[in-house]
Image: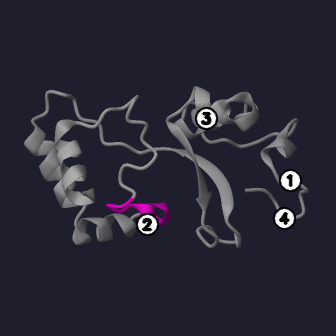
Amino acid sequence: MVRKGSGITSVKDLQGKKVGLGNAGSGAFANCELFFKDAVESGFYEKYPYFTRIEIPAGTYKGVDKNAPSFQDSALWVANAGVPDEIVYDLLSKLYTEKGLAYMHGQKKTFKEMSLKTGIDGINRNLIPLHPGAARLWKEKKG
C-alpha cells in the first residue's frame, strides 16, 4: 500500500524508495526481497514456481477500493511421508467441511478464499507432491 497521491502505481515506481517489507528475517521480508528484484521481467515466476499471481479483491483492506495485483506463496500443511495416510486424510476431511471452513473464514479476511474448489490451487505438484492421504481427499472431493 502507498499513500494516495504518491504517484506510485506499479512496483517499478518503488525503485530508489525506502520500502517497508516486514520484520527482518520474516517470511514476508524474504518473499518481497525476491519479488522486488525486477519481478516478471527477471523471470521471477519461472525461477520461483511456488509463487503465483493473485488479485486482492477490492474492499479486502480499508481504503483499497479496487482490485490490487499481488503475488503469493501457498500456505501448506506439510506432512512427512511417514505420517499414515489415514491421519492426513482425516485432518483434511475435518478442515474442509462447512464447519471447518466457516471457522477458517472467520480468522482472517484472506482465508475466505479457502474452499474445496481452490484448496490445492497454486501448488506446483512437480515440486511439492501431495501426501497420499491428501491426494485421496482431493480425488474424492474434486472428482
Looking at the image, residue 57 sits to the left or right of residue 82; the answer is right
Whether residue 34 is visible: no
Residue range in magenta is 108-117
* Residue 143 position in % (x across, y down): 24, 57
Camera-side residue of 17 and 35 = 35
Whether residue 84 is visible: yes
Camera-side residue of 116 and 56 = 116
How packed mark 3 is, by other alpha carbons closer than 10 Å (few <14, some 14-19, many 20 or more), is some
Q: Indicate which label's residue lies in the foreground, 3 or 1.
A: 3
Compute the Cα span from label 3 to label 1.
23 Å
Q: Which residue is mark 3?
A: 45
Compute the Cα span from label 4 to label 1.
9 Å
Compute the Cα span from label 2 to label 4.
27 Å
Q: Which residue is mark 2?
A: 112
Kindly identify the amino acid type of the residue bearing the numbered disc 1.
Ile
Q: Earlier in the sequence, mark 2 or mark 4?
A: 4
Secondary structure of the residue carrying numbered label 3 = helix
Q: Indicate which label's residue lies in the foreground, 2 or 3.
A: 3
In the picture, residue 119 is in which quadrant? bottom left
Secondary structure of the residue carrying numbered label 4 = loop
Kindly identify the amino acid type of the residue bearing the numbered disc 4.
Lys
Q: Which residue is mark 1?
A: 8
Compute the Cα span from label 3 to label 4.
29 Å
Q: Earlier in the sequence, mark 1 or mark 2?
A: 1
Looking at the image, residue 1 sits to the left or right of residue 134; the answer is right
Quadrant that contains the N terminus = bottom right
Secondary structure of the residue carrying numbered label 2 = helix
* Residue 50 position in % (x across, y down): 49, 35
Q: Indicate which label's residue lies in the foreground, 4 or 1.
A: 1
Q: Indicate which label's residue lies in the foreground, 3 or 4.
A: 3
